[in-house]
Image: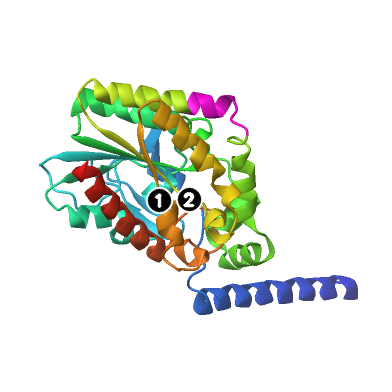
């Protein structure tokens, strides 16, 4: 082997050792940095009509945490086997990746209402069209007494109807390297980028926005045919809570105005989060634009319980 080849091999070996040492260091001294990505083996196609759902009795990793799916294909929250049923609709924000089931706001809601059977149908990647598929399927099985739909700004995206197994280098790094997640979180403002991208769907409202509102109306009408109440709860992005700028609230305001005109009950918990005095980033996973930390789930549960008490008094 030539001197050049030996030097190159030595540099590569040293680099690998250095990166490995940094990776171990991040895992030891920065436990709040979570991995990202969800194990595709947890999912199955055509769980609700054309929509992808969780595989019954599956166990796997989502955002670095082990998740357990019950026999019906929902995240396990120690719900009773009988009693009045509340149906939860949502995407990854409501599913709660990166935190244990007991720490999610849905599980905390179940703890407050132990006699209610709360079914969390949220799936990573869902959007409004998937919620309609879930409602249509559940209504044909066992209609619930109440439906709570937790709406994130990215719910205007296309529906999740096909599982893609392709693994990119970036995807592998997100799900295996906390060093990569740390560097990306420190060097890039992903929260702002995500918000600015998704705000374009609302300001001004485009075709995707109008289609989404029509889907929500279809869900409301489907439920109203059986006298089942629907509440739409609008969820915030980290960037919206971090900056002191009223303009960042425009997407939720536009959606809320549209819902009210159509007679759909909606609420925006934004003011509640802002009044906590908490730094916005502490309510979300590290470097994450929308997914709550344990503290964020706890605060969401507190605000949600206040909202439900008020709604029940109306």
Q: Indicate the position of residue 59 as horizontal and vertical percent values.
A: 33, 51
Disc 1 target residue:
269
Disc 2 vs disc 1: which is toward the camera?
1
Residue 190: image location, x then y, percent: 62, 55
What residue lies at 36% left-to-right and 42% top-to-bottom?
A: 122
Q: Is residue 175 magenta?
A: no
Q: Left or right: 138 with respect to 3?
A: left
Residue 14, relative to residue 39: is it above or below? below
Relative to 135, say whether 281 is above or below: below
In the image, 74 versus 105, the foreground residue is: 105
- The quarter in which the C terminus is drawn is top left
Marker disc for residue 140: none
Q: Nearer the viewer, residue 234 or 107?
A: 234
The image quarter containing residue 42 is: top left
As rendered, which of 221 and 17 lies closer to the eye? Answer: 221
Q: Earlier in the sequence, mark 2 or mark 1?
A: 2
Left or right, 143 with respect to 239, comes to: left
Mark 2 vs 1: CB contact within 8 A: yes
Which residue is more in the foreground, 305 or 124?
305
In 3D space, how far apart are the residues under numbered discs 2 and 1 (Cα atoms)?
Answer: 8 Å
Residue 50 in percent (x, y) is at: 41, 25
Residue 54 drawn at (x, y percent): 35, 40
Q: How dense is the environment of label 2, judged by Cα within 10 Å: few (below 14), some, or many (20 and up)?
A: many
Q: Which residue is mark 2?
A: 236
Is 40 located above or below residue 217 in the figure?
A: below
Tell me where the magenta segment starts and ends, as one range: 204-212
**Residue 210 drawn in magenta:** yes
């Amino acid at each position: 082997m030539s001197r050049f080849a030996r030097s190159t091999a030595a540099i590569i070996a040293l680099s690998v050792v250095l990166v490995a040492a940094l990776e171990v260091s991040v895992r030891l001294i920065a436990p709040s940095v979570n991995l990202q990505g969800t194990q595709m083996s947890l999912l199955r196609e055509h769980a609700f009509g054309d929509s992808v759902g969780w595989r019954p009795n599956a166990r796997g990793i989502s955002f670095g945490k082990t998740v357990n799916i019950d026999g019906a294909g929902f995240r396990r929250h120690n719900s009773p086997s009988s009693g009045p049923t509340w149906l939860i609709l949502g995407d990854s924000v409501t599913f709660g990746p990166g935190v244990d089931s007991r720490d999610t706001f849905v599980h905390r809601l179940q703890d407050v209402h132990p006699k209610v059977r709360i079914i969390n149908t949220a799936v990573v990647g869902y959007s409004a069209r998937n919620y309609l598929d879930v409602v249509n399927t559940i209504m044909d099985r066992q209609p619930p007494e109440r439906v709570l739909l937790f709406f994130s700004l990215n719910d205007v995206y296309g529906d999740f109807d096909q599982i893609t197994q392709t693994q990119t280098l970036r995807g592998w790094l997100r799900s295996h390297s906390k060093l990569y997640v740390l560097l990306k979180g420190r060097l890039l403002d992903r929260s702002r980028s995500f918000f600015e991208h998704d705000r374009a769907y609302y300001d001004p409202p485009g075709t995707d926005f109008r289609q989404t509102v029509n889907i929500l109306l279809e869900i409301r009408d489907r439920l109203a045919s059986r006298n089942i109440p629907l509440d739409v709860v609008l969820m915030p992005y980290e960037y919206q809570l971090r900056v002191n700028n009223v303009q960042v609230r425009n997407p939720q305001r536009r959606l809320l105005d549209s819902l009210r005109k159509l007679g759909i009950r909606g609420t925006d918990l934004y003011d509640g989060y802002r009044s906590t005095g908490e730094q916005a980033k502490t309510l979300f996973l590290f470097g994450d634009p929308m997914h709550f930390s344990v503290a964020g789930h706890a605060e969401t549960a507190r605000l949600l319980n206040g909202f439900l008490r008020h709604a029940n008094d109306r």
